[in-house]
Amino acid sequence: MKGHEESTKRTEGRGRLGKLGVSRRGFLSLAAGSAGLHAASKGWKILPGEALADLGDREASKDVKVVPTVCGVCTNKCGVLARVEDGKVVKLDGQPDHPKSKGRLCARGQAMLQVTYDPNRLKYPLIRSGPRGSGQWRKASWEEALDYTAENLLKLKEKYGPEGVMFSSTEGFQEHFFMDLSEAFGSPNTFRHPTQCLVANNVAFFHTYGTVPVPDIANSCLIIMAGANRAEAIMTPDTIDLFQNLHHRNKFIYIDPRYTVTASKADIWVPIKPGTDLALTLGMIHVMITEGIYDKSFVEEHTHGFDKLEEHIQQYTPEWAAKECEVPAVQIVEIARMFANAAPKCVFYFGRRSSFDRNQTQFRRAIAIINALAGNWDTMGGMLPPASARLGYTLIPPFPDHEAHRIDGLPESYPLNNTRDGVYHAGRASVLEGKPYPVKGWMIYKQNPLHGMPDRAKTQRMIDQMEFIAVIDILPTDMAWQADVILPEATYLEREDPLHTEKSLKPYVSYRQQAIEPLFETKPNFWIMKELAERLGLGQYFDYDIKKYIKNQMRRFPAEAKQALKERGVWVKPGYPRYGKHRARGKFRTPTKKIELYSTRFEKYGKDPLPVYESLPEPPDGEYRLLMGRNAYFTHAALQNNRWLLHLYPENRLWIHPEEAARIGVRDGDMVDLTSPVGKGTMKAYVTEAIRRDSVYMDHGFGHTSSGLEAANGRGVSDQVLIEDVADEISGGVCYHETFITVRPAT
């Protein structure tokens, strides 16, 4: 095995780094030590909007303040201290009081400065003046752009009904305003990100436990992670707790076809055959049940269907699993015993992306089941019921009923899913077919479907048949470049957002406070939605301002909570985490009021109520299974234009095993041609022993085509160009790992 240093080797991006405007050393110097650096350590007073005293002679003449806020780089929503000098943000650091990020801020979070001050940033509204995708735009005033958008939406509504417009968005503090507009408009066709991400996990755990538990990573003695590359696909606080507390626990077991950074930190790395995670987990369940090393009293008292599971699991022996997974049966038995012996302080971690294939929902069902067998529910170091703080609300009129069914067929087509999230691949297929009705308009907020959905050519065909597309974004993304009108949003540092709470071990509320005035002519999404609603005759649904909205959210809070939110940007509800309270009560939000090892809801809707494994097809001779994933430098496809981050990671490359590289005549750094059933690409090869011979791997998020992204344009290859359109039939989650490709030296 080659060293980890080789697994992170970078190219120099020949001829392109001159555009990036800051040296790599400069960025590293700027970022160094930020995990422990915060304003309090320097004696700075943290009060939004007030200049700070006691900053030394050099800063005495400056208007300096430190604003507590919340990072907007990804779904983690870490606490941030924004240092502002003379109206400009000059440094971002972690907020030490935030229970999720615990004073830390990753490279992406620090580099968000470069998004706010990106020279390619959208500065004012744009209306298309040439062919779609040509990059020909004319500057428009907000008045004209909003009138133009509303006029087109009303035309589409008159011609096709409100269902003729679909609304796509990705989660964020202001996303629900966008969703409210879609509801007020009357369209049932909302499409969010879960079927491209965590839908299988949500469906599996909700219909097993009646909720999606939170793993107590910090206090667990044994953790198993399958494909959740937490050192690079960062998830706070799980990433922090995992690596900060490695020396406190007995074992960390990591399962992945690649030797990732996370694998390098594990006690045991299992280089599993891709797509067989479910088989391995079923083999482990077999060991625990047949050897009687599960928590018998917990299973008897708190679970439903053990007798059926016991019979069902007999076919899935460790020897059978070994043949499927190419993992020795003795190791499967060993891991199962280790897991049982560590109970209840053990976690089989579900992550967000463990096995993007047709077994993904049943794999996560198996994870839910094996955790239940360990009796780790509501115990320290196990799986805890999520807790949250309740927010007040603003009353708005009832939304009109939808007269049309959803274009993706929900809830009938995927009855176990959250209907409002939608199933993206099914929606796209119906739009392209024009059945059961035409959809000709598309409103998009904070989403880039060209980089999120497999088979990019198919997404492009859907774009081409649209009569009107409006995009709200910060940068001229590939999707924005296809729009008819672009409405530029203010970044998170330039706006005040609603309060945010999420289910976690320690319930808390975050407050994203405005650090600086919006640059150029950009506006918060709330303002855009409110203005559009007025023009659409829907103003009654937005009859409030953001200040009033936040005041209503705080209505339930004690005085100390309101003070903490204003002064520190976060309030943590005292008395958590709590252990054992739900366990003592013993009632779950399932039809049987128990943890359903045998899922009655799956049975009701015609799905296998116990996890059934389906073997995946093998790659044909001369082809490889394409794997994709994340790295620590970028959030999906959102940050590749960031000059600081591109210095650290200029492009994605194709990981390929040395023996396979030699077979096809490729050396490290050579250009290779990639061909799949749906697309082609050319990129550099990275020859490494850190991947199995039957697979190749590429980072997600590269291959941007928008000429508006001067730094990102043309770097690497988009995985979505190559990946076929396949989805799990239970949850509709896309199957990113079921595509085979050929690799040849570039011609």
Image (cartoon, rainbow, N blue to C red):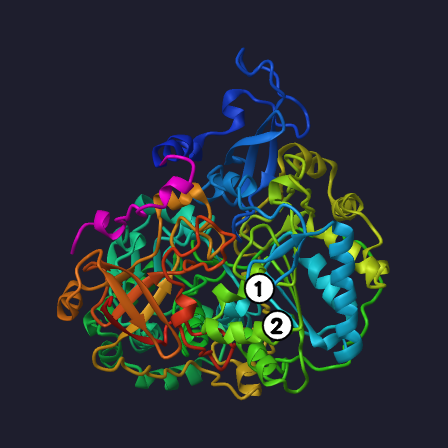
Question: Which is more toward the observer, 735 or 550?
Answer: 735
* CA gap, disc 1 and disc 2: 29 Å
Quarter in which the N terminus is drawn: bottom left
Q: Residue at x 29, y 45 (%)?
A: 12
Lateral position of residue 407 relative to residue 614, left or right: right
Q: Nearer the viewer, residue 143 or 226?
A: 143
* Residue 199 numbered mark, or none: none
| Residue 640, percent from left and from top | 44, 51
Q: Helix, strand, or loop for circle 1? A: helix
- Do callouts 1 and 2 mark residues in contact (Cβ within 8 Å)? no
Q: In the picture shown, does residue 135 fall above or below 492? A: below
- Label 2 residue SS: loop
* Magenta-tinted stretch: 1-23
Classify the position of the C terminus by image quarter.
bottom left
Q: Is residue 326 above or below residue 341?
A: below
Asked if residue 419 is positioned above or below residue 388 in the image, the reply reads: below
Q: Which residue is denoted by mark 2 in the rendering?
A: 418
User: Which of 294/267 is in front?
Assistant: 267
Residue 423 in sight here: no
Residue holding disc 1: 482
